[in-house]
Amino acid sequence: MEFAYSPKVEELRDKALAFLNDEVIPAEPRYQREKLEIPQWETPPVIDELKVRAQAAGLWNLFLPAGEQGLTNLEYAPIAEITGHSPWMMPEALNCSAPDTGNMELLHHFATEPVRDRWLPPLLAGEIRSVYGMTEPAVASSDARNISTRIDVDGDDLVINGRKWWSSGAMSPRCKVAIVMGQSQPDGPPHQQQSMVVVPMDTPGVNIVRSTSVFGYSDSGHGGHAEVEYVNVRVPRENLLGELHGGFALAQARLGPGRIHHAMRLIGMAERAFDLMCERSMVRFPFGKPIAEQGVFQDWVAEARIRIEQVRLLVLKTAWLMDTVGNKGAAIEISAIKVAAPQMATWVIDHAIQSFGGAGVSQDTPLAEMYEQARMLRIADGPDEVHKMSLARRELKRYRPRV
Amino acid sequence: MEFAYSPKVEELRDKALAFLNDEVIPAEPRYQREKLEIPQWETPPVIDELKVRAQAAGLWNLFLPAGEQGLTNLEYAPIAEITGHSPWMMPEALNCSAPDTGNMELLHHFATEPVRDRWLPPLLAGEIRSVYGMTEPAVASSDARNISTRIDVDGDDLVINGRKWWSSGAMSPRCKVAIVMGQSQPDGPPHQQQSMVVVPMDTPGVNIVRSTSVFGYSDSGHGGHAEVEYVNVRVPRENLLGELHGGFALAQARLGPGRIHHAMRLIGMAERAFDLMCERSMVRFPFGKPIAEQGVFQDWVAEARIRIEQVRLLVLKTAWLMDTVGNKGAAIEISAIKVAAPQMATWVIDHAIQSFGGAGVSQDTPLAEMYEQARMLRIADGPDEVHKMSLARRELKRYRPRV
Amino acid sequence: MEFAYSPKVEELRDKALAFLNDEVIPAEPRYQREKLEIPQWETPPVIDELKVRAQAAGLWNLFLPAGEQGLTNLEYAPIAEITGHSPWMMPEALNCSAPDTGNMELLHHFATEPVRDRWLPPLLAGEIRSVYGMTEPAVASSDARNISTRIDVDGDDLVINGRKWWSSGAMSPRCKVAIVMGQSQPDGPPHQQQSMVVVPMDTPGVNIVRSTSVFGYSDSGHGGHAEVEYVNVRVPRENLLGELHGGFALAQARLGPGRIHHAMRLIGMAERAFDLMCERSMVRFPFGKPIAEQGVFQDWVAEARIRIEQVRLLVLKTAWLMDTVGNKGAAIEISAIKVAAPQMATWVIDHAIQSFGGAGVSQDTPLAEMYEQARMLRIADGPDEVHKMSLARRELKRYRPRV
Amino acid sequence: MEFAYSPKVEELRDKALAFLNDEVIPAEPRYQREKLEIPQWETPPVIDELKVRAQAAGLWNLFLPAGEQGLTNLEYAPIAEITGHSPWMMPEALNCSAPDTGNMELLHHFATEPVRDRWLPPLLAGEIRSVYGMTEPAVASSDARNISTRIDVDGDDLVINGRKWWSSGAMSPRCKVAIVMGQSQPDGPPHQQQSMVVVPMDTPGVNIVRSTSVFGYSDSGHGGHAEVEYVNVRVPRENLLGELHGGFALAQARLGPGRIHHAMRLIGMAERAFDLMCERSMVRFPFGKPIAEQGVFQDWVAEARIRIEQVRLLVLKTAWLMDTVGNKGAAIEISAIKVAAPQMATWVIDHAIQSFGGAGVSQDTPLAEMYEQARMLRIADGPDEVHKMSLARRELKRYRPRV
């Protein structure tokens, strides 16, 4: 047992922290300004400049296990945390933002060669973006068996009909390709009913219906969250990812690393909120002494630190488990961090907001928008309650009376 | 002790509930649509139509103690609750929305005759709106002694210099007049340092700098929240409200009824969220049975009901105390509801959001925007922590060892 | 709506408060001393002296609706609260302690004349005590249908076989009679399976097996909590309470007022804990200033006050509902206070303990033992979870889609 | 970074788990029985038998860094966790129970040779027990500067006057020696006012006044918690530990490892409670299905697992920090686990109690007594609030504006 980062990770962290503090945080005001100046859904130009610098700094595509760095989950996790300090800029600047990372992994491992060659290189180069079509508006899609989009084999083609929402990024003009999950065999065994397919966004029948907001935010800088209709969308069968009716397993495989990334970014957000509230506490003097010297505020600081540290260790251990015993062996921990990280982050950010008063809920700090992101992650990829149920059932198995 | 509403209140409640269910809730989609069609900051036309109907229905200006209904706080409170079910439409439709209600009370009681005659009638008629300039960006204004805007006597004039924010409603073209609090005697005794003055919005030197958002919402339908700069703004001395240097007492007087209104509207919001989540629970079937039959959800329903009922009783008792022993005698309870009502409402609404999943955070339900309003009220008019401190100090006085 | 106590209640409260402060609290050290001096399970003599004084003061049997005062639930509730300030002494001193009050009500309303004449007068006189045999060790008796004790009709007799525990008071030599619930018709309709019967404790076959403790306390001053075995216990049929197979309804009827009493006593305990922690905060100086001036402590004081006030209002409203629309009409509120009162009381007492440090957990304050009582009431008469489920189901009925 | 236990630790854990499951848990009923049969405050004979077996099994004095195993904090921590599964038996059986472990460390490092030779061997052999006299009844001793016991130099002697309480173990006839902290230089610099001295319990003037209970438990099997009066107690100067006036630093040094031990034992208790509640959930059927299948219970299981895992990782990391950078470098984490571990444990145990109903609060499960122990540890060695304040102040230092 050893709690120090390896020298390789320390070196990467130093680079990433330097990039965060020297390049990204100073550029945040420019990002906000550009968002107001460019057409909605487009990417602020500052992001493209940062991408160039990130590549030069050796901070590009770090998420990719097969990349030149070949980082393990445990090695990449601390970098993901650092990107969370500036969650709207740094992940994208490093080409490490959701849902592209998970989509690139799927393409890498499960696409046919022509499909992979068509879509993976521009994604790896950060030239285009992609979308992941899973959740549906009409059903409780936390239970994957409820998914109702149809994927039908028709000769050499696959035909897709259905409606997805929370297709994050799809409002962006840079978004060129979707990975869509749908029912291909509704009467098959429970985990053999779904398939996953690659759909170019310009395929006839792919219609973007509208965007949905999260609290009052459109997340426009990232292409928002689209509701997308698929009407007789026809793609060649080679666009299938993996096996026909094998979509459930792919969805599971995709989730593991994504949970680490989300959780670590949430820790980064919490640390940023912590920094902001502590800095503020030094310069604000209600009732004659700085907030930093008030008992209730100190209680929050201590609670925040205790909560952050615990979640970080749990996520790092989960990453280590994934590296050593695989997603399945880490199933309890993966559920645990899916629940624990957003709960911790919403708690910390909410208290930072309270420390700031009016500035905390407004555009003058990143706190309210961070809260929105963290709160959303108690719902996205399955609500807390589903993950807790699943975790509990695994635990309880051990206690079943033996017959 | 008697917990039934009086026949007078029951009759008013019936009218208000009928108006809510027959006129307001069915008009909500139209309100949302119109907000997108009209220029930002303008009032959706549906509101003006509803105002006419509310007047016809005898539901106009009910907040005003001196109005024809002459409602006590205890009688008005249940009506305020009902308006909270549709918080963006119904309070304004009944001409009972903040900050106009508090401002009308100040004008009624403390303005000189010419000033009152100039501004009160159009406010009572719902023709114009008003703003309350209290909070400042540069200081911790939860401690009123920190307020730094200057109000200087200069011959027969008052000259105002300073910067206020969270001036709610000021972005609306209908907003015509401000009530501004500022320092007139910085070296006076603690509660004799401030004055309050009526400032027409078109007075030279009144500059609207920008609007601030709340969790991504601009609150555009209500005129948003403005940052307003006052540069050598000059008004005649008759624009003073009450005594020179007597602003602190006015601010206190204004707060009492406002706290009841806010708290009851929050209860209405919580009841709306409760309705929504219970309705949803009947028609959504994850994992094979309706959400309504799942234990964790039932736990939320019970907790929500228990919390709502308790806060409602506490607010009603507070209203009764204000009616019988005055704001001062109700000081502990006024602080208590300032803390308890938003905490309860954020809890209930947050769980309703969680019950809805993606729809809960988006524009498809009113929940996320209700959350924003409830969360804001843990900060506006002083953060929870200040009210708890003040409540505790009053309680602890009773225990001081007698010498 | 009116939140003032009636003059009649105010007068009774004055008497009860005087008795509490002048007679009971000063006698607490004597009670503790006597408990150590007398045989375990006996009643400290000070209680008998206080009983005489309570009778003289007109504070006797106030719980009884048919008593000379004829108090409603709403009128009795504030007196029950006052008794909770000294929960081991004052309820018994006023002959208002559980389970005797509920048992006396059952005897009064449902016993045959000879049985009532035998047992009610000595109970009303406070000469004997009684026990209520409901809960069983082998089954989840929060679901009454699980109760497995048998009550069989055998000619003119009833024969009881089974095992009960948490028979509070049964260890006391003064405890002379039990009311026992058991299955008389296991295959009857769900609410027609149980009967209730009066069993003199000296009937052959009634065996006290042992006592159970609560967090280390034996509750010896009140006759502890016994496990009682009933082996072929034979009583005449006239000992039946109410109808044969009608026990379920009696159990429900018994619970309503009992819930008010328990809840109000819990409020009294919370107020006592609040007093103690506030008094302590004035005289204890860690880190250079009194606890009373430390922010975190003030936060607890405010939270405690807010929680206590809300629960008190909810219980009083529930009492009023029971008086005006009956137990059934008050079902949601009765469940609500069963959950809310012990939660509030454990919270307040736990924070009072924390304020006292070592003295708080020890015998030097009544706090730890109060905590035990409050914590037990989250379990006794059904755990929180059962009441929340039941409350939620009643609420959700309103939302069932109409076909 | 590496989360697996080392082979050495795995081997020790296997031995300790075997001892727990094969020797200790099966002996628990005997321990409870013997406690009732022997005089209060004596040690149940089963403990002495287990001590012999633990020595044979190589599980003796593992806590001692200088012992033959030479375990680091990180290596010993997982063993301490295992002992927490049976907290009244296993720590003592392994000669690893508080306060003896901390006292042995002090004697080893800071006693003069004659004093060390007199007291350390019998303690290491488990033949006698010892007491740590720190807390005082009259002052807020969470602030060490408040300690008022006097230690005066008088020629070649030290003379002790004062009163200590919570001297755990002192009621036991086996307790032979105390380490006492007191003021030797009240007007010295803040951390140079105290001294620590070794006092044989049979020294004239050492008077045991009484025992204090925790909730209703006397902790009699471990010698309870005594209030001890020191009246002109005279010991030779060689009984001083370390430097004169250097007691504060010794107290700090003593605390570090003790915090790890307490925290890990709390994790063990939580795991035991978790086991018990999960096992119970399989065999108890309220409302027609096992508790294990009820949503609210599953939610508790998940929450409990998430909380336990996080605290365990935090404590292990703290142990690692103490091993690598010392107590001072681990100061924030040591405070963090002092707060986090008892909070987690009280939460888990409380929910286990609730799962058991009446059995949970009684002597039929170890849960209520475990709760008492965990709750006490939110107070002992300084209340949560003091540790949070101290943690926060360390954190906030980083944010002080640079001049």
Image (tube, coloured by chain):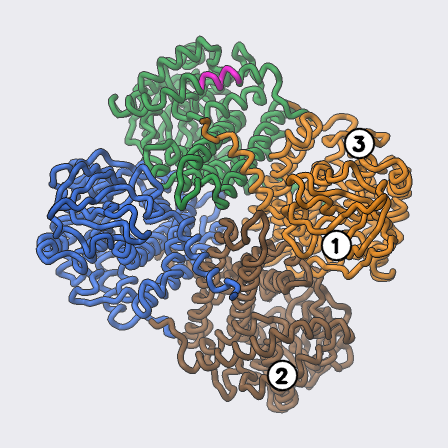
Chain colours: A blue, B green, C orange, D brown
D395 inside magenta stretch: no
Look at the numbered disc 1 and give the secondary structure of its residue: strand
Residues flagged by tags 3 and 2 on a common chain: no
Which amino acid does the dot numbered 3 rest on? Pro
| Between marks 3 and 1 in the image, the one whose residue lies nearer the viewer | 1
Instruction: Locate residue A325 relative to residue B346 in the image: left or right.
Output: left
Viewer-nearest residue: B32 or B96: B32
What label sits on residue D373 in the rendered view? Answer: none
Viewer-nearest of labels 1 and 2? Answer: 1
- Image location of residue D176, percent across then percent down: 70, 82
User: Which residue bears the numbered disc 2?
Assistant: D51
Q: Which of B211 and D242 is in front in this view?
A: B211
Does mark 2 fall on the same chain as mark 1? no
Mark 2 lies on a secondary structure that is: helix
Segment tinted magenta in the rendering: B14-20
> Where residue B306 sits: x, y (%)?
56, 37
Image location of residue B236, percent across then percent down: 39, 17
Query: How far from the left and from the top, in percent, is residue D62?
Result: 53, 82
Which sits earlier in the primary sequence, circle 3 or circle 1?
3
The Cα–Cα distance between marks 3 and 2, rounded to whole angstroms, is 62 Å
Q: Please, what is the three-letter code of the amino acid marked with disc 2?
A: Lys
Chain holding disc 2: D
Q: Relative to A144, does residue B331 appear above or below in the rendering?
A: above
Label 1, residues with CA under 10 Å away: few <14, some 14-19, many ≥20:
many
Residue at the disc numbered 1: C162
Q: Is residue A111 visible?
A: yes
User: Which chain is indicated by disc 1?
Assistant: C
Q: Is residue B189 visible?
A: no
Q: What residue is disc 3 on?
A: C65
**Left/right of residue B402 with respect to residue D102 in the rendered view:** right
As shown in the figure, which amino acid type bears the numbered disc 1? Gly
